Image (cartoon, rainbow, N blue to C red):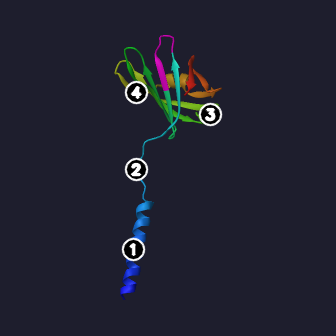
Amino acid sequence: MKKLAKIMAVFAAIMMALAFAGCNNDDDDDPSTVAVYNGTDEDGAEFVLTFYDDNTLVAVMKSSDWSGTVMAGTYTGNPSKDGTITVSLTKLFDNKTGKLVDASEEVKAVADGDYTITNGKMEINGLIFTRQ
């Protein structure tokens, strides 16, 4: 009977070790970055366009007197490689409220669509963005 108890104790210890080793931290719900593009306009303002693995994108503007998120949306395609991506704008910065608001249909008509990435560069409304 003592031998059976020892075997069961060893078996239980092995099972606990395997259970502990099998646990991982899967609480990371934050999206991971797929690609980042930088662009600078004629006034020197920098734009950083970040694409995430949950098919969302965010544009941040940094100028000498202001910095913040100016656009958010979704995309399809692979922005980490040359090819075509399709962008759908969902939010846009509103100068009156100082917040992101739902993009109007007029703005979406101009911004939404296909964008071609060639040699790690793409043009959006006349501004050239370069993949980092």
Going from N to C along the chain, the mark reached first, 1 or 4, is 1
Q: Look at the image and say whether residue 99 sits in the magenta stretch.
A: no
Q: CA distance from mark 4 to mark 3?
A: 30 Å
Q: Residues within 10 Å of mark 1 (few under 14, many from 20)?
A: few
The residue that mark 1 highlights is 12
In this image, 52 relative to 25: left or right?
right
Residue 100 spot, x, y in % from top left = 39, 27
Mark 4 or 2, closer to the camera: 2
Residue 116 spot, x, y in % from top left = 63, 27
Give the residue drawn at x 41%, y 80%. Answer: 7
Going from N to C along the chain, the mark reached first, 1 or 2, is 1
Q: CA distance from mark 1 to mark 2?
A: 27 Å
- What type of secondary structure mainly makes up the magenta span? loop
Q: Amino acid at mark 4?
A: Val
The residue that mark 2 highlights is 27
* Mark 4 and mark 2 residues within 8 Å of each other at the beta carbon: no
Question: Looking at the image, is 35 positioned above or below residue 1?
Answer: above
Q: Amino acid at mark 1?
A: Ala
